[in-house]
Image (spheres, rainbow, N blue to C red):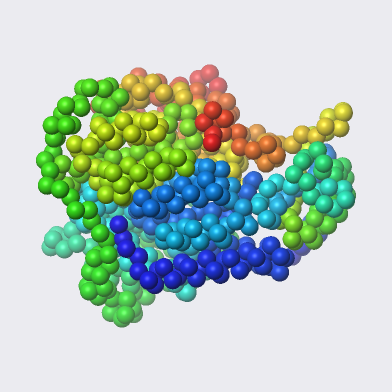
Amino acid sequence: MTSPLQQKLKITGPVVVTANRVADGAVVYRRADGGWTTQLGGAAVATSASVAQDMLAAANVDQIRAVGAYVAPVKVAADGQMQPGNLREAIRSTGPTVDPRITF
Amino acid sequence: MYLYDELDRTLVAERVAEFRDQVARRLSGELTEEEFKPLRLMNGVYLQLHAYMLRIAIPYGTLSSAQMRMLAHVARRYDRNFGHFTTRQNIQFNWIKLEELPQAMADLASVGLHGMQTSGNCVRNITTDQWAGVAPDEIEDPRIWAEVLRQHLTMHPEFSFLPRKFKIALTAAAHDRAAVKVHDVGLRLHRNGAGETGFEVMVGGGLGRTPFIAKTIKPFLAKRDLLSYVEAILRVYNSFGRRDNIYKARIKILVHDLGAEAFAKEVEVEWRQIKDGPLALDPAVVDDIAARFRYPAYERLEDSPPALAAARGSDRGFDAWLANSVANHKVDGYAIVTLSLKPEGGPPGDATAEQMEAIADLADRYSFGEIRVGHEQNLVLPHVAQRDLARLWRALDASGLATPNVGLVSDIISCPGLDYCSLANTRSIPVAQEISRRFRDRDLARDLGPLHINISGCINACGHHHVGHIGILGVEKNNEEFFQITIGGRADEDAALGTLIGPAVRYADVADVVEDIVATYLELREDPQESFLHTVDRTGIEPFRERVYATR
């Protein structure tokens, strides 16, 4: 059986590597220097499958700080501003969409 | 209330100490996630979208006021000031930090609460009727048998690694409030022709991606045989249940593939070998367990006391709540009060720390310190003197807990959905909030009568959409949220799966579709007494389909 780390990764646009922080489960993004940040804007962006694969492999070695790393799509504006690439990632990035008039 | 003994307290305390050590080793890196995951799951700790989630069992849905106060404390100290009551008599905290979990668990253990067997491939929290022990239509308190099973199946070594999770529910009433027919094993206490009390045993019910209504494999099982027979079912499942495919691993698939009759025969063969052994229930043991259930010292009161008569008609809100949320009690002069956790526009099943504390105080003042949790994600004060109803209503109303919508269109059952859950494909709670706002007209809701809406954000069906009168299932298409709509499902003694009415609709259209379905019902019903379900049964889904898709 092929290891998940050896499986081919198909990407159709810019991606980042994201995970949850071990200590509190918070959403984190892989930085270019190998650290993790809670700010999507600080994430390293990959635009090719091979770079994304390398970033993911490096992230998966880090067993102490972050857990469940995977590649997530992002949208990058002309000015370089990053936005989550889909609803799931948007919710992970900015929190539940539950009506704020009611949420606690 | 059930009084846990020293054995239970020691078990829970030891588990907290074990988990504290496991968390320390995980945080230090001594344990990998692969090693740690099964350990945390054994304690009800999941990793969700934004944080760890802790699921706490509320056995047979019974909570003391002290336990409710502790839940409020956990919500405030370790979470974001609220908790979410689920469809299986559990509560979930969505924002717990791993590093604080051992202390949260220690706090919970101080009042006998824990997350053991709320996750993993084991026998999960055993659920029952939230009106157990007080319902006029029950033949005896089913919690005694739930407790018998709980004691036997807690940390049962043979059943700690089943092919998949295993859910048991019991009822002892004519009207099934515990949805027993959509559980892996459903038990219905009833009397046979000879006047003896025993169990109808149903097996292989369940929702998820392959929904089935449970089949009866034993119409009458004597009480002494409860443990041995359930053990035999679990052994057959453990032996023959599939472990090669997670989607085919539940007992419902085995029962379906073998056929209920063949499955029953396998159980019978196994059972005959063990039925007269140590698992045959000694009545003295059952009596001992029953004696640990403490019932209130009810006063001798009469129904419809002057205080209640005087309050009637004094406030329209009170009258609406009385008619909707207050039910008959088996003891004269008392009532069962349901506390709606479905405020108009609110997230179904959520309660704030302040609400939990208010409920605990009101339980002490008006319900002998006892609270129940129902699978509909509402709470119950089970022993309220009718003379206190008006005072209780005012206090509940002040805390946002007196919405008179129990069993009505805005009493929506919903999973957490994509706002919290890592398995979800779509959101559920905002859909429920929007539908609830559309039907905030209480006169309309009352006129519609019983109308249960169930929403699941993925095929795992935690919102039990298959058995909603109107069921809503979120699916993803090309990165967009769509929702399949079913009608005609029900979770009671006549449990049935709903029928899909047509193609999935967009997120923004779901509330409109529900309004169309409701409008169609109002046009079709023969008179205001004909319920939504009866109308669907009579007309079929076609008129609803036509209306919903006429302009879509």
Q: Position of residue A64 (x, y in %)?
A: 74, 61
**Residue in view at x 80 percent, y 55 percent:** A59
Quarter containing the N terminus of chain B: bottom left
Which picture quadrant has residue B547? top left
Task: Tell me if I can see residue B285 in this picture.
Answer: yes
Looking at the image, residue B46 sits to the left or right of residue B205; the answer is: right
Answer left or right for B308 relative to B413.
Answer: left
- Image coordinates of residue B79 in percent, x first then y, are 56, 47
Q: Is residue A103 left or right of residue B183?
A: right
Residue B495: percent from left, percent from top: 35, 45
Q: Nearer the viewer, residue A60 or B76?
A: B76
Q: Is residue A37 above or below residue B390?
A: below
Above or below, B70 against B519 in this view is below
Q: Can I make out residue B255 in this image?
A: no
Q: Is residue B407 above or below residue A72?
A: above
Instruction: Name the image quarter holding residue B507.
Output: top right
Which picture quadrant has residue B276?
A: bottom left
Q: Whole-percent x and y of residue B288? A: 25, 70
Which residue is at the front of the view, B286 or B176? B286
Please determine whether, in this image, residue A94 is positioned above or below residue B363: above
Nearer the observer, B303 or B536: B303
Q: Residue at point 57% right, 30% down?
A: A100
- Label count reads 0
Residue sitting at x 27%, y 22%: B316
Query: Measuring 52% from the left and 42% from the top, which residue is drawn there?
Result: B81
Indicate the quadrant containing the C terminus of chain B: top left, top right, bottom left or bottom right.
Answer: top right
Query: Does residue A57 appear to the left or right of B370 in the view shown?
Result: right
